[in-house]
Image (cartoon, helix red, strand yellow):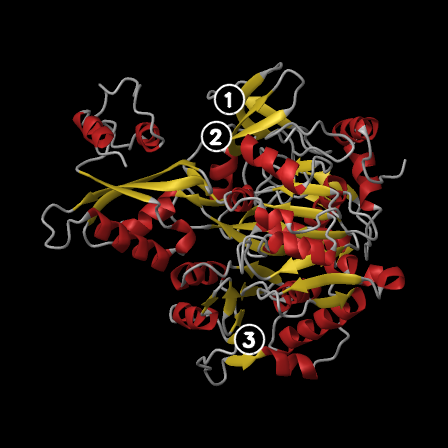
Amino acid sequence: MSMNTIKNADDYKRFYDMSLNDKEAFWSEVASNYKWNRPFEKITSGDFNNLDVKWFEGAKLNITENCIDRHLEKRANKTAIIYEANNPDEESLHITYKELHSRVCKFANVLKDRGVKKGDRVIFYMSMVPDLLVGVLASARIGAIHSVVFGGFSANALAGRIQDCEATIIVTNDAGFRGDKTVPLKAITDEALKSCPTIKTVLVSKRVGEDIQMIEGRDHWLQPMLDQADNNCDPVYVDSEDPLFILYTSGSTGKPKGLLHTTAGYMVWAGETYKNVFQVGEDDVYWCTADIGWITGHSYITYGPLLNGSTQVMFEGVPTYPDAGRFWEATEKHKVTHFYTAPTAIRALEAHGLDYVKSHDLSSLKVLGSVGEPINEEAWDWYNKNIGKEKCPIVDTWWQTETGGIMISPLPGVGKFLPSFAESPLPGVDPIFVDAEGVEVTGNPAEGNLCIRSPWPGMARTIWGDHERYRQTYFSTYPGLYFTGDGAKRNEQGDYRITGRVDDVINVSGHRMGTAEVEDALNQHEDIVESAVVGYPHDIKGQGIYAYVIWNPQSKNTQDPKQIHKELNDMVIKMIGPIAKPDKVQVVSGLPKTRSGKIMRRILRKVASGDSSNMGDISTLLNPEVVEEIKNGAL
């Protein structure tokens, strides 16, 4: 049986059952789709008790050989990347697989010339320019470990990530275009590097033409080096479990977690999930609107599409620049067939009305996708009716940075496409619901905390430099299970619906951030005694950030709530970045706490969401009187 794309319900059932009941046969067949320098001796070993999971042991491979080289015989002149710049008047750039090969090799040789070798960490802090995609692949080409830091993070956040992985080299732009703004990426990098002694080399890709400071010996313009580099670079073969990348995600304690993904399992997972979920044909044009700074941009821009030899759009800009028709204009221009975006973007564009949609021909579209958070029914209906014209399946994908790729999703030709349901686990995914005590919730319908029962190839293997934190974060709540941190429901037919976070993590516009990280930033303000942050329902972002703060009563500074909000936003922007700034700030005299000192976030969440009717039993609180004050002052 050849593992081709799942086309119908029978295929799905056969593949899914085989993936759980005969893992060896299933994954051997799937892995035969890829190029191995040395074949694997064993499909999988290890479990969630010892956390020593390994996939495709004994193999040697290079992921870029699978993304580029193996396509050259048949697809050398096929477009790999259509680069759509921030400004729609700038001509789109088409890069073929042959040209991509040449660019990646040149960049890899530049990195080698700067002393980068297998296992070294390379940081990318860039806007969405081709050099970012090429640079990430160039790192993988020589066995280095890439770590992309989203270009919206502050100098402080960037420095923390560089320090954690002890990177020796960083690649950035002079500045980046983002809608009608420019982001001073090199200046932010310079600020970050004041506290990062491990960085010896800064490579600067010229994009905006900003005046920037270049430090002799450390800083180098990238393009002249690429111009001189050889366009051949043999791939460095790595072991199946050698690290491919570190991607930092917010933790529920202040310090971000560097999730480590290894090479072979991640490659197979990214390649196969892309193939089955999107079902992109040879002549189709796929477009994922994410930034490579997030896991979506790793798995479904950098790797998944290229592993499958697809043509894809890479977009520098934002959905509302120069107006709210930008996505649809570019879809028409490039005849996009497969479009993958976040519910936040869909809701924002819905708010701008249909005039921006109606003026564009969207008849090329075949499949629509949603990523980052559960899509609400209203946004699903709008997307389905106005963008897909009720003809395009919507793959509402559930997955996480930790999972490496899509875990639960309807599939074209298979799914029922129920609004806001992720529906079915992909082959290899064994989900389970448990209650608060860890007892399995069986039958349908059902509701519980979503866990995964057995390892899958794409899972992160550890947190960089802190395996104990990895165990504590994901495997200590329910021993022997991976706890996703999400709640979920199954309907009578067993279709899955994700209901959202059950821990102290907020999902803002599809980007997860720990409440503790935001609180740490707020608490840096000299007049903040203590803070507590919760998520609340937000029409556009899905969840907004609501901050309760205790202002020092002895402070000589402002007591004006608007000014306090502004100062705290400035603090959060400086420490983390604009994405984490609170939407609402309520000044309170105290926070509801248990006698052991734990903040009762349940109460704060209820007030923030506008539901202060039933607070439950508050008599056990240390300070029950503060609850009434918080309710009365709610914003």
Position in image of residue 506 (x %, y %): 43, 40
In space, the residues marked 2 and 3 are separated at their CA atoms by: 43 Å
Residue designated by label 3: 203
User: Pointer 2: residues within 10 angstroms few (<14), some, or many (20+)?
Assistant: some
Position in image of residue 60 (x %, y %): 76, 55
Q: Is residue 553 left or right of residue 140?
A: left
Report the amino acid beneath label 2. Thr
User: In this rendering, which labeled residue sits more in front, label 3 or label 1?
Assistant: 3
In space, the residues marked 3 and 1 are separated at their CA atoms by: 49 Å
The answer to whether residue 622 is visible is no
State which tag comes first along the sequence, 3 or 1.
Answer: 3
Q: Is residue 316 left or right of residue 523?
A: right
Position in image of residue 249 (x %, y %): 49, 49
- For the residues labelled 1 and 2, say whether their Cβ atoms are less than 8 Å apart: yes
Residue drawn at point x = 70 percent, y = 75 percent: 106
Name the residue nearer the viewer: 286 or 265: 286
User: In this rendering, which labeled residue sits more in front, label 2 or label 3?
Assistant: 3
Residue designated by label 2: 477
Residue designated by label 1: 438
Q: Which mark is residue 601?
A: none
Element at badge 3?
strand
Report the amino acid beneath label 1. Gly
User: Pointer 3: residues within 10 angstroms few (<14), some, or many (20+)?
Assistant: many
From the viewer's perspective, is residue 95 above or below residue 257? below
Element at badge 1?
loop
Residue drawn at point x = 78 percent, y = 33 percent: 413
Kindly indicate the quadrant of the structure image that contains residue 433: top right
- For the residues labelled 2 and 3, say whether their Cβ atoms are less than 8 Å apart: no
Report the amino acid beneath label 3. Leu
User: Pointer 1: residues within 10 angstroms few (<14), some, or many (20+)?
Assistant: some
